[in-house]
Image: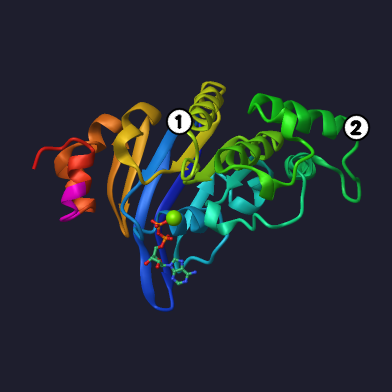
Amino acid sequence: MDAAISIKDLHVSYYGSEAVKGVSLSVDPGKLVGIIGPNGAGKSTFLKAMLNLIPRDKGEVKILGKSIKDVRKKIAYVPQRSDIDWDFPITVLDAVLIGTYPHLKVFHRPKKKEKQWAFACLERVGMQEFSKRQIGELSGGQQQRVFLARALAQQADLFFLDEPFVGVDVSSEETIVSILKELCTQGKTVVVVHHDLSKANDYFNELILLNKELIGFGTVEEVFKPEVIEKAYKGQFAFMKEIGVSI
Ligand code: ADP
Ligand code: MG
């Protein structure tokens, strides 16, 4: 069986300054993986470079044993909130309908079948009553649910979400987590950038701990240890207290 994600020696830099240095790892299908690390650690950069959304300096990435361009339709990506233009004039239902586009034939517009499917995805995230609203009129949690619905509409095999819980209410966070866990039980692979470590234990099977370099990778039990975490968060004592590590 091919790995869901296989990365060899990934390097990314901005204007000559390295943001991701030599990351290699492999993730099996059906896993819920958290990417953790301090602010500016290169988490978003790593995710974008993995998905070919920004250029890499070096490195090989295979998704389901293939190069990204051959499996693009199987990948759903929900960007970080700050990367999304929330003023863009689009209704909730239309935003979700975009998720069905990869399955449409060339020059075909979404019809009744696609609209029903998009609506079903909105129901799954509890946002069906908001279908006619503009996305800019929603709360953070509602916006994140809509983006998850769009990813669901795509019927992808791999889901990549960048900080989906930032600015999100508790109930939306619970809804999103339970859907992500359910996707994994269906054999889908889910990768989530998450900077708040307090829930990492409950949410993920595996953790990728980054600070430019790969500091730790493995099961939550293997990575979520003070001596490993400390390597990524050097000197950030307040943070260590926050996660209950005695110092
Ligand atoms: P994280 O998501 O872990 O907070 P990022 O991947 O956003 O980290 O950023 C990693 C580093 O790269 C930071 O130092 C950031 O300032 C820099 N960086 C990110 N995006 C750009 C960009 N478009 N141009 C230049 N530098 C960038
Ligand atoms: Mg980021």
Between 192 and 46, the one nearer to me in the picture: 192
Image x and y of residue 218, in percent:
30, 37
Q: At numbered mark 2, what does the secondary structure look like: helix, strand or loop? A: helix
**Residue at image mark 2:** 112
Q: Residue sitting at 16 percent across and 50 percent down?
A: 237
Image-quarter location of ligand 2: bottom left
Q: Is residue 12 found left or right of 129 in the rendered image?
A: left
Label 2 C-beta lies within 8 Å of the nearest ligand 2 atom: no
**Residue at image mark 1:** 31
* Res 2 seen here: no
Q: Mark 2 Cα within 10 Å, few/some/many (few <14, many 20+)?
A: few
| Image: magenta residue range | 234-238
Q: Residue sitting at 66 percent across and 25 percent down?
A: 124
Q: How are the colours assigned in the image? A: rainbow
* Res 20 seen here: yes
Q: Determine whether label 2 and label 1 are within 8 Å by CB.
A: no
Q: What is the residue that sits farthest to the bottom in this orientation?
A: 15
Q: Is residue 239 found left or right of 152 in the rendered image?
A: left
Location of the C terminus (image quadrant): top left
Amino acid type of the residue that numbered disc 2 sits on in the rendered structure: Lys
Q: At numbered mark 1, what does the secondary structure look like: helix, strand or loop? A: loop
